[in-house]
Amino acid sequence: MSSEYAPPSGYGQYDRPAPKNGAAIAGLVLGVVALLLCFTLLAAPLSLLLAIVGLVLSIVGFRRVGRGRATNKGVAVTGLVINALTILISAVISALVIAGLVVALNNGGSEAWDCFVDANGDQAAVQRCVDDLNARAGVQ
């Protein structure tokens, strides 16, 4: 008998499955959620927090790939990039929102807020608040 009918080597041998990289996947998911949230002005600080956690998880996932314990390097790198970008965008948006609030509060915003709260939903009182605020600002 010749060996021409012998099965080729490699068939039927299974290596163990590629290890999962849950940290990289979680980092990527957090990065995408944080990126979507960062463009809503009031959620920018939450987005910043999520992106920081996502960045840490992506770094852990990237290190697992480097040690040969995982194979999805692309997911880890994508998570790193998205989270770093989101941290930058969220920090800028958060700083702008905080600066805007500070400017508003220093330019009569707290008095206007107090006036609106004291109006307690009375439309005539609210209109007086608006008229008073416009008079201070010089708006006709």
Image (cartoon, helix red, strand yellow):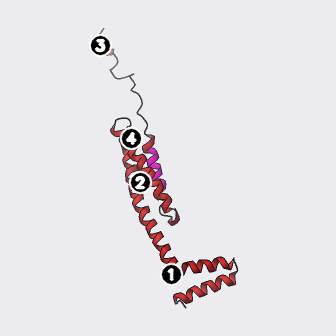
**121, 118: nearer the viewer:** 118
Circle 4 is placed at which residue position? 72
The disc, 2 or 1, on the residue closer to the chain's N-terminal end is: 2
User: Which residue does the image show at 64% across and 86% down from the upper left?
Assistant: 128
Query: On screen, 63 above or below 130?
Result: above
User: In the rendering, at what x and y percent does residue 123 appear?
Assistant: 69, 81
Q: Tell me, yes or no, whether the two marked residues, 3 and 2, touch with CB atoms within 8 Å.
A: no
The residue pinned by badge 2 equals 83
Instruction: Give the main secondary structure of the magenta stretch.
Output: helix
Q: Secondary structure at mark 2?
A: helix
Foreground mark, 1 or 3, reads 1
The earlier-in-sequence mark between 1 and 3 is: 3
Please provide the residue range marked out in magenta: 25-39
Tell which tag, 4 or 3, sits nearer the viewer. 4
Q: Amino acid at mark 2?
A: Asn
Label 1 SS: helix
4 or 25: nearer the eye? Answer: 25
Q: CA distance from mark 2 to mark 4?
A: 17 Å
Residue located 44% across and 70% down the image: 96
Q: Nearer the viewer, mark 2 or mark 1?
A: 1
Q: Amino acid at mark 1?
A: Asn
- The residue under label 1 is 107
- Which amino acid type corresponds to the residue marked 4 in the rendered image? Asn
Residue that mark 3 sits on: 3
Was residue 36 drawn as part of the magenta stretch in this picture?
yes
Q: Is residue 85 visible?
A: yes
Is residue 132 toward the left or the right of residue 81 in the image?
right
Q: CA distance from mark 4 to mark 3?
A: 39 Å
Distance between the alpha carbons at the discs numbered 2 and 1? 36 Å
First-in-chain label (4 vs 3) = 3
